[in-house]
Image (cartoon, grey):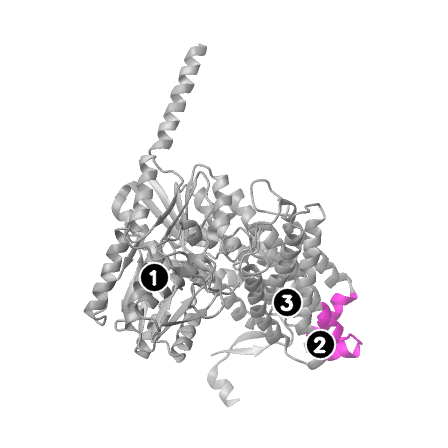
């Protein structure tokens, strides 16, 4: 009698374990900070969601919540999703970090993926892209294309990711054009077409003839098109907003990663991890180069892309000094990921003070 | 021919009939909207208005969302009755959260039972002080408190982002503009285990009760009503307008500040740039939807919260775009203000030719 019961219990436990390990059909949810129609950050994440549907067909159901503010509402949105029977939830903005961890604690069986954060748990992974590799490439192009030697940079928040991007672009531009100067405007928002357009206009008035942005709307691209100058698309191909202005765009290609992670949940092989991929894996990609870039510059940029992909070139290779003149990287030294992840200083040559 | 005629005095029936009518009209036109988007209209309305009331989780979330709306709405409605237009509750909310949050972070290493009350006091003081700026400017220089209080919202937002990006930034936060998470003794006690509903809900209800008493039983409440409805009579009766401006702005500012602390120390648990979720502005709608009556504000806060929670469920289940939910909420205010015409006017059917000749 006792033995039978034990056997039954064991069988039940095995059955349950089996059910937890592999699933027939999973539900994947996405939380976006902006509208799916922002044509930038959130739009690109939604492309990844659609890629999951295309790749896994009827084995998966996907849903999303858009325009979720990074405040008190984020936790509720995440909880609602977890309660609605999702197996895997992607929280696609930095401000969702603490809410994601809180909700993950209460739903240990739901898997969470948080973009651009640094806190993990057994059921919370983090992932981000090495956008600075893309910034290196557009920095090269910008340095070659500017006539006024002034590049305008629309920056969002002074967090390491953005500072890294400015430094990478500046170092690359400087390497091909020693006279280049960066003008940086901080707009303190990720998505505000009005503010972004104002910033673009202000930069153009200060002599910038190439605009880079680390904000999500295509508004700066539209301004660049009107004023007849050059710009780079952000997060997605923004050519339709600046057919003449766009030189290329850094594209956040989340699709392969999203499909891989959803598959892992289906197979029962998902594990908490920290992913930081770049050009090599295809997470950072580029829109087709504009015809207006001279062939030799195009070749140079393409060579840089290939070198980075092959691991032969790191955008942060010494000698590099910090803005205050102190040595950061010695000749030939390559930056380590920990320093990059917490980067809070400008490199030598960038003017102005980093907002603290 | 239809025409509007002014009533001799506001219709009491219409005062109470228009809010439900506005909700009903919103439902009807909302269903048209949902149908036009290709969604089952009845099912969508059921998800938005009925289902959140059925699950314990959603009910708790309703309380979380409604509490700050009620707290701020009650304060605002006092002033609106007397013609004191505090439009900047959002700013007072932010300054309250910053003041209370900073107080909590300052004593991070010495936790104790006194921390949370101290944070609440600091938050109320912060909101109060922020509201005193437009109040004093109005009684000293006759400035317009609508503009001044509204402009101060943007100043408050910049203060918040400057502080969380600077002095209050989490030392281990990789430079991200956020404070560290509050210590356990600096967070709101939870009312219902396993949910986010915190004791601020009880405070909001108590405040609504107190406001009702003040309006019904206290000369202060009476003076506000008179000032709003008959300013000249109020002057003859010796009610001081200056005192009313200071009192209304002060009370609504302190309550908005308190709501800010509750939000920071409750659902969020830290200071973040995204903390202000528009409660200060939504509370204006709530105050009017509730007819500036404390009981009405409690109900209106609940209805408003319902549209948010239900709106999210509808997004999830019906894949309704977020913008459709915003349109739906906008309709509610539109119909309420539109229906307000009938409080002071009546619709008359007249034969056009007869009236022309007469």
Cα–Cα gap, marks 1 and 3: 65 Å
The image quarter in which residue A154 lies: bottom left
> Residue B334: where, in percent of width, then height?
50, 68
- Counting from the top left corner in percent of width and height, residue A270 is at 36, 38
In the image, which residues are magenta? B219-247
Packing grade of label 3 (10 A; few <14, some 14-19, many >=20) is few
Tell me residue B11's x, y (percent). Answer: 62, 70
Q: Earlier in the sequence, mark 3 or mark 2?
A: 3
* Count of numbered tags: 3
- Secondary structure that dominates the magenta span: helix
Name the side, left or right, on which A66 lies relative to A73.
Answer: left
Q: List the residue tagged with mark 2.
A: B230
Q: Nearer the viewer, residue B257 or B114?
A: B114
| Residue that lies at the very extreme toward the front in this rendered image | A331
| Residue A187 seen in render | yes
- Nearer to us of marks 1 and 2 is 1
Q: Secondary structure at mark 2?
A: loop
Identify the chain of the residue marked 2, using the numbered disc in the image: B
Near-viewer residue (B175 or A66): B175
Residue extending furthest toward the right: B238
Tag of residue B12: 3
Q: Which residue in the protein does label 1 denote?
A: A135
- Please determine whether, in this image, residue B264 is positioned above or below residue A171: above
Q: CA distance from mark 3 to mark 2?
A: 18 Å
Place residue A161 in its image quadrant: bottom left
Q: Classify mark 1: residues with Cα within 10 Å, few (<14), some (14-19) or many (20+).
A: many
Identify the chain of the residue marked 3, using the numbered disc in the image: B
Residue sitting at x 43%, y 11%: A3
Residue A112 position within the rendered picture, expressed as x and y whole percent measured from the top left? 42, 44
Magenta stretch: includes residue B230: yes
């Amino acid at each position: 009698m006792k033995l039978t019961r034990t056997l039954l219990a064991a069988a039940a436990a095995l059955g349950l374990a089996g059910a937890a390990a592999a699933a027939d059909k999973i539900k994947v949810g996405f939380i976006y900070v902006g509208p799916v129609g922002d044509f930038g950050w959130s739009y690109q994440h939604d492309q990844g969601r659609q890629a999951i549907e295309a790749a896994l067909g009827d084995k998966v159901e996907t849903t999303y919540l858009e325009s979720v503010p990074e405040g008190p509402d984020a936790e509720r949105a995440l909880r609602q999703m977890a309660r609605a029977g999702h197996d895997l939830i992607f929280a696609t903005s930095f401000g969702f970090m603490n809410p994601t961890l809180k909700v993950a604690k209460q739903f240990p069986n739901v898997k969470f993926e948080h973009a651009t954060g640094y806190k993990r748990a057994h059921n919370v992974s983090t992932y981000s892209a090495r956008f600075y590799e893309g910034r290196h490439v557009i920095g090269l192009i910008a340095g070659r294309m500017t006539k006024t030697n002034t590049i305008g940079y629309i920056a969002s928040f002074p967090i390491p990711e953005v500072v890294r991007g400015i430094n990478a672009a500046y170092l690359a531009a400087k390497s091909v054009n020693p006279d280049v100067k960066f003008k940086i405007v901080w707009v303190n928002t990720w998505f505000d077409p009005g503010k972004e357009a104002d910033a673009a206009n202000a930069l153009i008035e200060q002599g910038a003839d190439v605009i880079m942005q680390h904000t999500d709307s295509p508004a700066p691209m539209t301004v660049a098109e009107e004023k007849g100058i050059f710009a780079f698309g952000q997060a997605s191909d923004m050519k339709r907003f600046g057919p003449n202005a766009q030189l290329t765009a850094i594209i956040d290609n989340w699709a392969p990663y999203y499909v891989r992670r959803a598959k892992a949940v289906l197979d029962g092989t998902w594990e908490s991890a920290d992913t930081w991929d770049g050009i090599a894996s295809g997470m950072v990609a580029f829109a087709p180069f504009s015809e207006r870039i001279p062939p030799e510059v195009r070749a140079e940029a393409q060579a840089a892309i290939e070198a980075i992909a092959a691991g032969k070139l790191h955008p942060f290779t010494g000698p590099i000094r910090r803005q205050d003149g102190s040595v950061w990287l010695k000749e030939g030294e390559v930056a380590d990921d920990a320093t990059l992840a917490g980067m809070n200083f400008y490199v030598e040559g960038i003017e102005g003070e980093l907002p603290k | 021919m239809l025409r509007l005629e002014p009533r001799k005095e506001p219709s009491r029936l219409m005062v109470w009939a228009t809010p439900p009518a506005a909700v009903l009209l919103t439902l009807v036109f909302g269903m048209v909207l949902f149908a036009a988007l290709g969604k089952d209209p009845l099912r969508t309305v059921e998800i938005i208005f009925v289902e959140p009331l059925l699950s314990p989780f959603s009910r708790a979330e309703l309380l979380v969302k409604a509490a700050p709306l009620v707290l701020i709405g009650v304060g605002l409605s006092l002033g609106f009755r007397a013609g004191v237009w505090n439009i900047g509750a959002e700013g007072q909310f932010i300054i309250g959260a910053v003041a209370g949050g900073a107080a909590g972070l300052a004593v991070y290493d010495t936790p104790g039972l006194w921390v949370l009350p101290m944070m609440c006091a600091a938050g109320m003081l912060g909101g109060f002080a922020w509201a005193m700026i437009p109040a004093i400017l109005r009684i000293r220089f006759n400035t317009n408190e609508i503009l001044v209080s509204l402009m101060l919202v943007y100043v408050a937002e910049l203060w918040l982002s400057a502080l969380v990006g600077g002095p209050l930034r989490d030392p281990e936060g990789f430079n991200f503009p956020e404070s560290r998470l509050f210590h356990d003794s600096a967070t709101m006690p939870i009312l219902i285990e396993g949910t986010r509903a915190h004791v601020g809900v009880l405070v909001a209800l108590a405040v609504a009760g107190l406001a009702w008493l003040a309006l019904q039983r206290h000369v202060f409440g009476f003076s506000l009503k008179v000032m709003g409805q008959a300013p000249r009579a109020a002057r003859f009766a010796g009610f001081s307008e200056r005192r009313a401006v200071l009192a209304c702005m002060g009370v609504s500012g302190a309550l908005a500040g308190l709501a800010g602390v509750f939000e920071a120390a409750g659902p969020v648990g830290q200071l973040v740039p995204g903390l202000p979720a528009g409660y200060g502005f939504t509370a204006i709608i709530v105050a009017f939807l509730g007819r500036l009556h404390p009981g009405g504000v409690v109900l209106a806060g609940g209805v408003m919260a319902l549209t948010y929670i239900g709106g999210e469920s509808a997004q999830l289940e019906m894949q309704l775009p977020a913008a459709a939910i915003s349109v739906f909420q906008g309709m509610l205010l539109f119909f309420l203000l539109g229906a307000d015409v009938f409080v002071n006017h009546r619709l008359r059917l007249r034969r056009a030719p007869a009236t022309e000749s007469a």
